[in-house]
Amino acid sequence: EAQVTQNPRYLITVTGKKLTVTCSQNMNHEYMSWYRQDPGLGLRQIYYSMNVEVTDKGDVPEGYKVSRKEKRNFPLILESPSPNQTSLYFCASSFSWARENTEAFFGQGTRLTVV
Amino acid sequence: SQQGEEDPQALSIQEGENATMNCSYKTSINNLQWYRQNSGRGLVHLILIRSNEREKHSGRLRVTLDTSKKSSSLLITASRAADTASYFCATDAGEETSGSRLTFGEGTQLTVNP
């Protein structure tokens, strides 16, 4: 089954404790991205990757890191989480970064709480 | 920055009625997409309309795009209780160097009452 898989689905952590949210897709998609969703603010892009070893900042990259060592994986790293990073996070992938084929497939989300 | 803005923020209708949601955006786009989200879950792609298209249909969905007004509408006909969800428009204004950049609005919460 074609899908984007995120783990974990739920996470409660303490301020400053490094964490990684994994994302994996099995559709051989070139383009992957991370979004956070907050009430009243909609979805905002954190980072995106157009292909292996190519990553770039989205609209709200502060406090986050990503890597794209393999085509299928795009982990989101919070080196020192803070309470303002409490949010619902989504990983998404699409076939291409080009103007066509940009339909995005989303993971099920990771609800992160930083206390 | 948020590009798409949906209107209304919330919509409540009876089963069988049609639901219309609108989306406005600010800059030139390559395409506009509509997504659906069930409470707290991932977004699911519904339909994509390109900037040179004016109308598109998919099952009970009808999407229109007016690039002169920078607006789009999503019509769901003969709604069902299972259509209850949040609906988001997303604009793709990406360029050759930066690739696809989907920008989402805040969504319309649709409730279809049985």
Image: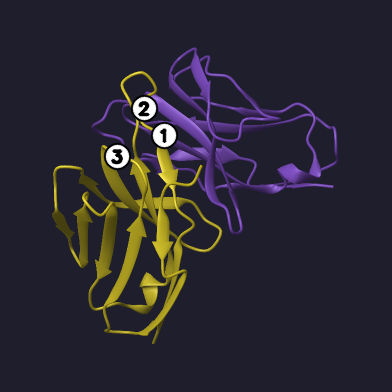
Q: Residue B51: horizontal and vertical position, in percent?
A: 20, 43
Image colouring: by chain
Label ID, residue A93: 1
Q: The disc labelled 1 sits on which kind of residue?
A: Ser
Q: Residue at x 50, y 31 (%)?
A: A24
Q: Residue at x 14, y 42 (%)?
A: B52
In the image, the chain rendered in yellow is B
Label ID, residue B28: 3
**Direction from residue A33 to residue A100 in the image, left or right:** left
The quadrant the N terminus of chain A occupies is: top left
Q: Residue A20: horizontal and vertical position, in percent?
A: 69, 30
Q: Residue at x 47, y 23 (%)?
A: A49
Give me the C-alpha separation between circle 3 and circle 1: 23 Å
Identify the chain of the residue marked 1, using the numbered disc in the image: A
**Direction from residue A64 to residue A108 in the image, left or right:** left
Between label 3 and label 1, give the one nearer the viewer.
Answer: 3
Q: Label 2: which residue?
A: A29
* Co-location on one chain, circles 3 and 2: no
Give me the C-alpha separation between circle 3 and circle 2: 25 Å
Residue placed most toward the observer, A49 or B72: B72
Could you say whether the residue bearing mark 1 is in a helix, strand or loop?
strand
| Colour chain A is painted in | purple
Could you say whether the residue bearing mark 2 is in a helix, strand or loop?
loop
